[in-house]
Image (spheres, grey):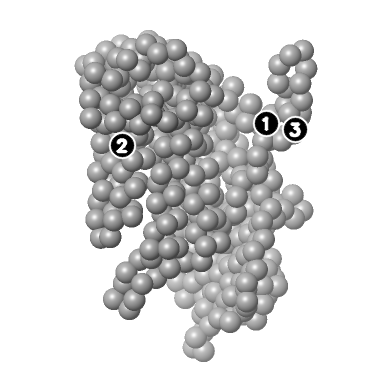
Amino acid sequence: MSNLVTRAQNILLAPRTEWPVIATEPETTSGLYTKYILILAALGPLALFLKSTLIGTATFVGTFRVSIGMGLTWAVLAYVSTLVAIYLWSLIINALAPTFGGQKDSVQALKTAAYSATGAWVGGLGYLIPWLGGLIAFVGAVYSIYLLYLGLPQTMKSPAERAGGYTAVTIIVAIIVSWILWSIIGAIVGRGMWSAYEGAAVSDGSTVFEKGSTGAAIEDWAKKMEDAGKKLEDSADRNAGVPSSAAVGSFVGALVGGGESVPALPVDQIKAYLPETLAGLPRTGMSAERNAALGFEVSEASADYGNGDGRRLRLEINDTGGARGLLAFASWANVEEERQWDGGFERSYRADGRMVHERWDANAKSGEYTLIVANRFVLEIDGGAASMDELKSALAAGVDVAGLEAAAAAQPKPPG
């Protein structure tokens, strides 16, 4: 423990002298996780748990606290997602290394991610401080970017003059991936937790994942990431160190799209799936848009329905398009979770090969029902109803689910 405290103190207070030491240390992935990452990554979730359940948040109407169970659920979710995020960040750092004149090394990339994140992890303790907690956490996150900038030339051997661009691209890609990942996880599982890897078998002294298991799917994704990284490196070599936009798009597509470049449905096409009436309620407004960033697309259409009696429903259809690989991640995890309380419930499960999430509040006579179609489209209906079955029926009757599945199957992939 003393070594951990010394390392954290040195990287925060004397990063210019500590990074060269870190770069030359022999280390392993498991050693980095057990001796550093697993401990420091818990600081922020622990602070949030104590703040939300025991200390509480002061408001003008009094102090607000959540239940121990809810606080623990969110703390565990935040902790696990942090561990996964560090690993994904190290993949990004490693894949981009040749593009900025560096050397690929997965262990050095994990070192870079872990020790750079020290600022954000320690800053997470600021949540325990009233009023200033958010500001302290923000400062910690910004300082982590500075640590990354100082560390890349040492660990990944990138020229110092290219460290700024390396840092900027790494952060941008990481933010995009995190934003998409959290958006989709929130829509699919609510407060659900992902299950662990499954189906591993041992053959000839090495780990081999059974076909169709979570491990096999993630292993296949990792291979696609490696191929995309090579293409990015080749493109940079051909263009004086600057990869083409197509190569960058291919890399991001491998990260969030599972290696497939799939265009999202055009606005007019996805908007056509919003019915004029839903559960007998007329449509009172709607919107649709398609956005693209770094080679992948997502589109969204939503509509509100209501009458003069105050009843309302909202329907959203999201086409994850080029980010569909993240839906596959959730699918591989085989999410199943259920919570019940007085007057309501929340559950996630699979039905007919599709992922489903339900939340119902019997006291308010309202709920939300989310359905994943073709591992690509996220359909969500929420609002007032007599029961959850009524929301399900409204979605089934109002949206052409079979049409969405057919559109996904028939849509041609772009060349390249």
Which tag, 3 or 2, sits closer to the chain's start? 2
Q: Position of residue 362 (x, y in %)?
A: 62, 79
271 vs 138: above or below:
below
Q: Quadrant of residue 275?
A: bottom right
Q: Can residue 351 be seen from the camera position used here?
A: yes
> Is residue 217 shown left or right of residue 152?
right
- Name the element at disc 2: helix
Residue at the front extreme of this rendering: 2
- Closest to the camera, between mark 3 and mark 2, is 2
Q: Residue at x 56, y 61 (%)?
A: 69
Residue identifier under label 3: 199
Residue to which mark 1 is pinned: 215
Say which quarter of the image contains residue 101.
top left
Task: Please count the marks in the image.
Answer: 3
The CA span between labels 3 and 1 is 7 Å
Residue 37: where, in percent of width, then height?
45, 32
Residue type at mark 2 is: Gly
* Percent coordinates x, y for residue 186 in the rendering: 52, 54
Query: Label 2, label 1: how many angstroms apart (C-alpha)?
Result: 32 Å
